[in-house]
Image (cartoon, rainbow, N blue to C red):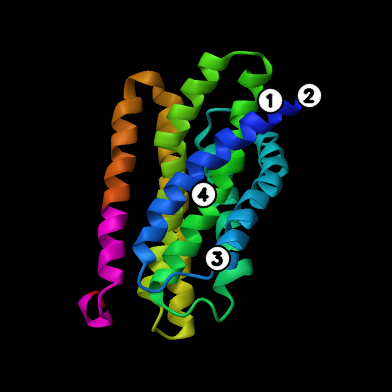
C-alpha cells in the first residue's frame, strides 16, 4: 500500500469537497459559523462513511444487487448517518442559532461524507496505476455524486430551517419529512444511474444540477425575514 497513492486518493477526495464547501459557505457571509464547528461537521461526515460501509455490506447480504430495495436501504443508511453527523456535532448545540445554520451544517457533513467516499473510489484505480480511470472517476463524482449527497442533505437542512421558529413537535415532523425526501431522492437517482447506464447519465446529472439550483434559490429565501417564507 503506497503512501503516495493513499495521499493522492485522499487529496483527490477532499480537495474537490473543499471547493464545494467554500461555495456554500459564501451563502452565510452575514453570520458565518465558527470554523471549529464547520471542521467538526466535516470530520463527522467523513467518519459516517466508516459506519456506513459495514452497514451497507450487511444490507447487501439480504438484497440482490440492482434491486430497488437495496438502493433504498443504502440511501437510508447514508442519509441517516449524515443527518446524525451534523446533529451530534453542531445542530444540538447553541451554535445552531438561526435557520440558515441547518443548511450549512447539513451541507458540510454531506461534503465530508462525499470526500472520504470519493477518496475510496479513487484508491482502487490509483493503486492499479490507472490514472485515466481515476481522473474520469474524479470528474464524474465531482459533478454528480458529490452534488447528489449535497442535494439530499440540503433537503434536510431546508426542512430544519423552515421549522426553526416552530414548536418542537412540528420541528420533528419537518425533520422526518426532510429525511424521507432525502432518502427518496438519493434512492431514485442511484437506481436510475445504475439501471440506465451511460445513456441516461447526462439527464440524471442535469436533474441533480436543477435540484441544486432550486436548493440555492430556497436558501436565498431562508435568509430573508421569516414572513417571506412561512
Tell me: residue 11, above or below residue 18.
above
According to the picture, the residue beneath numbered tag 1 turns out to be: 5
* Callout 2 secondary element: loop
* Cβ atoms under marks 4 and 2 closer than 8 Å: no
Query: Which residue, given by chain and number where applicable, does mark 2 sit on?
Result: 1
- Label 3 crowding class (10 Å Cα cut-off): few <14, some 14-19, many 20+? few
Q: Position of residue 146 (x, y in %)?
A: 46, 41
Mark 1 packing: few (<14 Cα in 10 Å), some, or many (20+)? some
Q: From the viewer's perspective, is residue 204 above or below residue 113?
A: above
* Secondary structure state at the residue bearing disc 3: helix
Closest to the camera, between mark 4 and mark 2, is: 2
Question: Which is more N-terminal, label 3 or label 2?
Answer: 2
Which secondary structure class fits the magenta region best? helix
- State if disc 1 and disc 2 touch (CB < 8 Å): yes
The reply to whether the C-beta atoms of the residues labelled 4 and 3 are less than 8 Å apart is no
Residue 64 appears anywhere in the view: no
Residue 38 image offset from top left, x and y in percent: 55, 62
4 or 3: tag closer to the N-terminus:
3
Say whether marks 3 and 1 touch (CB < 8 Å). Answer: no
Q: Residue at x 53, y 38 (%)?
A: 71
Q: Nearer the viewer, residue 7 or 121?
A: 7
SS class, disc 1: helix
The answer to whether the residue labelled 2 contacts the one labelled 3, judged by CB atoms less than 8 Å apart, is: no
Query: Along the line of sight, which residue is nearer the eye, 48 or 59?
Result: 48
- Specify the label residue 35 is tagged with: 3
Q: Earlier in the sequence, mark 3 or mark 1?
A: 1
Magenta-highlighted residues: 214-228
How crowded is the residue under tag 2: few (<14 C-alpha within 10 Å), some, or many (20+)?
A: few
For residue 178, the mark is none
Residue matched to label 4: 111
Left or right: 169, with 196 as reference point: right
Mark 4 or mark 1, whichever is nearer to me: 1
Amino acid at each position: 500500500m503506497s503512501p503516495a497513492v493513499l495521499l493522492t486518493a485522499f487529496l483527490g477526495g477532499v480537495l474537490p469537497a473543499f471547493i464545494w464547501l467554500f461555495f456554500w459557505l459564501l451563502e452565510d457571509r452575514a453570520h458565518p459559523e465558527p470554523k471549529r464547528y464547520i471542521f467538526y461537521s466535516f470530520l463527522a461526515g467523513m467518519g459516517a462513511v466508516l459506519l456506513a460501509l459495514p452497514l451497507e455490506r450487511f444490507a447487501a447480504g439480504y438484497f440482490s444487487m440492482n434491486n430497488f430495495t437495496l438502493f433504498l436501504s443504502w440511501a437510508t443508511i447514508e442519509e441517516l448517518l449524515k443527518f446524525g453527523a451534523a446533529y451530534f456535532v453542531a445542530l444540538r448545540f447553541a451554535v445552531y442559532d438561526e435557520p440558515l445554520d441547518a443548511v450549512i451544517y447539513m451541507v458540510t457533513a454531506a461534503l465530508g461524507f462525499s470526500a472520504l467516499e470519493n477518496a475510496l473510489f479513487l484508491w482502487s484505480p490509483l493503486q492499479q496505476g490507472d490514472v485515466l480511470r481515476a481522473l474520469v472517476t474524479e470528474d464524474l463524482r465531482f459533478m454528480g455524486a458529490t452534488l447528489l449527497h449535497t442535494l439530499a442533505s440540503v433537503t434536510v437542512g431546508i426542512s430544519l430551517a423552515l421549522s426553526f421558529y416552530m414548536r418542537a413537535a412540528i420541528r420533528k415532523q419537518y425533520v422526518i419529512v426532510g429525511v424521507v425526501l432525502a432518502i427518496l431522492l438519493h434512492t431514485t437517482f442511484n437506481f436510475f444511474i445504475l439501471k440506465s447506464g451511460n445513456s441516461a447519465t447526462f439527464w440524471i446529472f442535469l436533474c441533480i444540477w436543477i435540484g441544486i439550483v432550486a436548493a440555492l434559490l430556497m436558501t436565498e429565501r431562508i435568509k430573508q425575514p421569516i414572513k417571506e417564507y412561512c
